[in-house]
Amino acid sequence: MEKANEVTLVFDSRPVNEALARITAASFCTQLNPTLEEVADLKTAVSEAVTNSIIHAYEGEIHKIEMKLCITGQEIYVEITDHGKGIPDIQKAMEPMYTTKADTDRSGMGFTFMEAFMDDLKVESQVGAGTRVRMKKLIGR
Amino acid sequence: MNELFEFKDAILTVHLPQDLDHPQSDWIRKETDRIMSRTYVKRIVFDFENTEFMDSSGIGLIMGRYRALGMGQKCIMAVNTGSHIDKLLHLSGVHRYMEIQRAEEEGEDYGKSK
């Protein structure tokens, strides 16, 4: 498949970098002339995935998160990878309102938002090895 | 009290920041809890006037304050919500627990200003 444009960003799992990641994705996406709503959807989805890596995968420890962005035609592909503790039960984790961290007011809506705002969501995870979230969104449908 | 927080007649108004993400939600949660530990708060009004971005961390913040206030009717409220914020409030289901006053849409007040 022809790849029109690609970016990879590797950053520390610090909460302040959540904004960096979503702004990078939003800015990269502008070449597809997205609507404001499409940009907001993409930013929220990226923010959810990165926040998951920071809070759940690394649990506050500082390690690397990798975000890969790729544009093919009118579609943006986002891949977010961490090498954290992994998700034992992905199906359970993806249930709306399910959270392991209710005490810190996590809503359990992260995966639900990613699913709602992107056209395709795939989650691969291995306990003790890490998690990779892959999402796609068609811009300007 | 920080300028983001306004307290009058047991009603706490939180003027939310531009980005209501994980770090900002954490900070506001702590600050709100601190105020609530010192004073009786009957109701919290979340003002989204300046808010352009929110993710599920913001939903967690709202749900958590709803629980902290005893989950009573009308104990939480959202005002000046734009379309993105409104979408998240509905998608997450929190709209069922709160009154939402949307920001006036452009054009909706057409004629009023004349």
Image (cartoon, coloured by chain):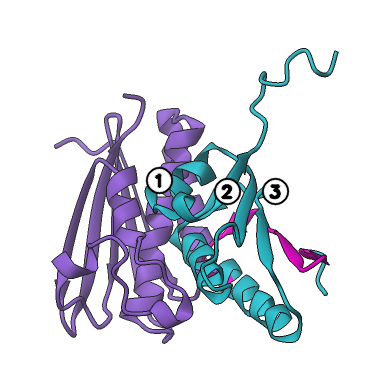
Chain colours: A purple, B cyan
Name the residue: 69% across, 69% down.
B42
Q: Is residue A108 visible?
A: yes
- Chain letter for mark 3: B
Task: Look at the numbered disc 1 and give the secondary structure of its residue.
Answer: helix
Q: Is there CB contact under 8 Å for labels 1 and 2? A: no
Residue A25 makes an appearance in the image: no
Circle nearer the viewer, 1 or 2: 2
Kind of element beneath mark 3: loop
User: Above or below — where is A73 with respect to B51?
Assistant: above
Q: Earlier in the sequence, mark 3 or mark 2?
A: 3
* Front disc: 3 or 2: 2
Residue linked to disc 1: A42
Specify the quadrant of the image occupied by residue A76.
Answer: top left
Q: Amino acid at mark 1?
A: Leu
Q: Chain of mark 2?
A: B
Instruction: Return the residue at label 2.
Output: B99
Q: Nearer the viewer, residue B81 or B97?
A: B97
Point out residue A89 in the picture as x, y percentages from the top left corner: 14, 74
Q: Which residues are magenta?
A: B4-23
Q: Which x, y percent locates residue A14? A: 49, 76
Residues at marks 1 and 2, CA–CA distance in whole angstroms: 27 Å
Q: Which residue in the protein does label 3 denote?
A: B50
- State the image coordinates of residue B41 (x, y, percent, origin top left): 71, 73
Q: Does residue A12 belong to the magenta stretch? A: no
Q: Chain of mark 1?
A: A
Give the residue displayed 76% in from the left and 81% down from the top: B39
- Residue lying at the far front of the rendered structure: B73
| Quadrant where the C terminus of chain A is found in the figure | top left
Q: Amino acid at mark 2?
A: Glu
Q: Quadrant of the N terminus of chain A?
A: top left
- Relative to residue B8, is residue B51 drawn left or right? left
